[in-house]
Amino acid sequence: MTTARRKLKIGITCYSSVGGSGVVATELGLHLARQGHEVHFITHTLPYRLRGYEDNIYFHQVEVTSYPVFEYPPYALSLAAKMAEVARAYDLDLFHVHYAVPHATCAFLAREMLGRPIPIVCTLHGTDITLVGLEPSYFEITRFSIRKSDRITAVSEYLAVHTRKSFGKDLKIEVIPNFVDPRRFTPRAINARREHLSPDGVPIVMHASNFRAIKNVDHVVKVFARITKEVPSRLVMLGDGPERISAERWVRRLHLEDRVMFLGNQEHIEELLPCANVFLLPSASESFGLVALEAMSAGVPVIATSVGGPREFVEDGCTGYTARPHDLARMARLAIRILRHPAQARDMSRNARAVAIRKYHVNKIARRYEDLYLEVVNGAGKGA
């Protein structure tokens, strides 16, 4: 007879904008709520992918008040106060924060205000460690916030190693990778959207990101220019951000206006990914690369950066390929190989989905978080 698992009251704080960390935090919260846990999102705005009513989901908006004496609105202080308020009002069992700074910092302040030892689980996603945390002005507060967390998780072994190297070899970090729901991200044999994206039936190369500099979106366009010279195809760009203008300029410079579509941010990316024949992610670095995993679940071979987390789930020659971020010739050559060999592409498609289901199914990964929550709530000791 299976013993019923304790239902928890969980406070989740994350960035609400489009990006892997916010997506993971939101999808995890939704899954936990469907398992009967009570989930409270404490964020500045409604998290991306949190749309419509869901049982056991609560949203608490952090309001930042402007005051003449403050040059910048003190968001972190408002967030800490709100976290303490929600924890007190709903008797939360723990905080799960995504990103060390400022969220783990705010969780620590909230705990001090509460005056009770509410556990803090901190999930590291990447730039909080690899960029922000290494800035001299943020280094000490990042290290302090990590070490004041009761348990630390990282989304890849790459990130765990990087964190220990930067903030202390003694840090206890559990690697819990990102996940995907294969029922949502699934191949589609009949796809009307594909006919719209490629009315002439040529292959589709796809990219999706927040269009920040680290994503190398100009590389996507340059690689595609090489691909379409050999295999006539179309490029579909999903997302938006500061580097979109640069990417659009490269499209015009390379005379690809009739071959490239910029669709902006898309709420239902699961409807578009299955349209692709190849997915490109040539980032300078990826701590994990969630969208590449989502593409794999949708049965799309991936060509991803070899710097960081993608190497842990993109298997060269099996589910796709990895390449150095500036090796545009290799990326183009590999994409052309996939597009010219349909039988190999079908094998990669099946393998990619199989790996996503076997290793990264949301049920499997969410259960690991549940186990961790129960351990920390029952006082199993600090990870830091």
Image (spheres, grey):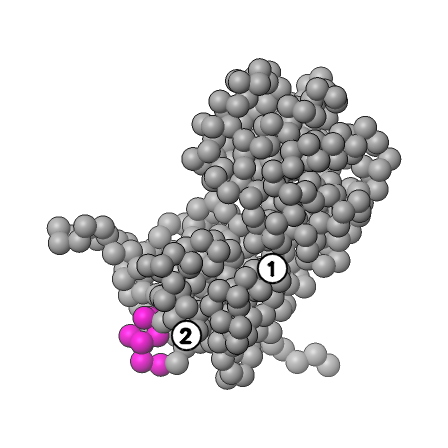
Q: Residue at x 84, y 37 (%)?
A: 344
Q: Please, is residue 207 above or below residue 41 in the view?
A: above
Q: Which of marks 1 and 2 is in front?
A: 1
Q: Which residue is drawn at 43% across and 63% down?
A: 100
Quadrant of the drawing holding the N terminus: bottom right
Q: In this view, does 340 lie to the left or right of 117?
A: right
What amino acid type should be assigned to the residue bearing mark 2? Lys
> Horizontal and vertical percent for residue 147?
43, 73
Residue placed furthest toward the left = 68
In the image, the segment drawn in magenta is 109-116
Q: Is residue 212 left or right of residue 344?
A: left
Q: Which of 108 and 55 is in front in this view?
A: 108
Tell me the SS state at disc 1.
helix
Q: What number is the disc on residue 148? A: 2
> Horizontal and vertical percent for residue 323?
68, 42
Upstream in sequence: badge 1 or badge 2: 2
What amino acid type should be assigned to the residue bearing mark 1? Tyr
Q: Which residue is drawn at 80% across and 47% down?
A: 318
Q: Please, is residue 193 above or below residue 209 in the view?
A: above
Tell me the SS state at disc 2.
loop
Q: Main secondary structure of the magenta part?
A: helix
Residue neighbourhood size for the residue with mark 2, other residues' Cα within 10 Å, grouped as few (<14), some (14–19), many (≥20): many
Is residue 123 visible in the rendered image? The answer is no
Q: Check whether the beta carbons of the residues at disc 1 and disc 2 lie within 8 A of each other.
A: no
Q: Which residue is drawn at 54% across and 83% down?
A: 380
> Horizontal and vertical percent for residue 179?
63, 56
Residue underneath mark 1: 158
State which quadrant residue 91 falls in: bottom left
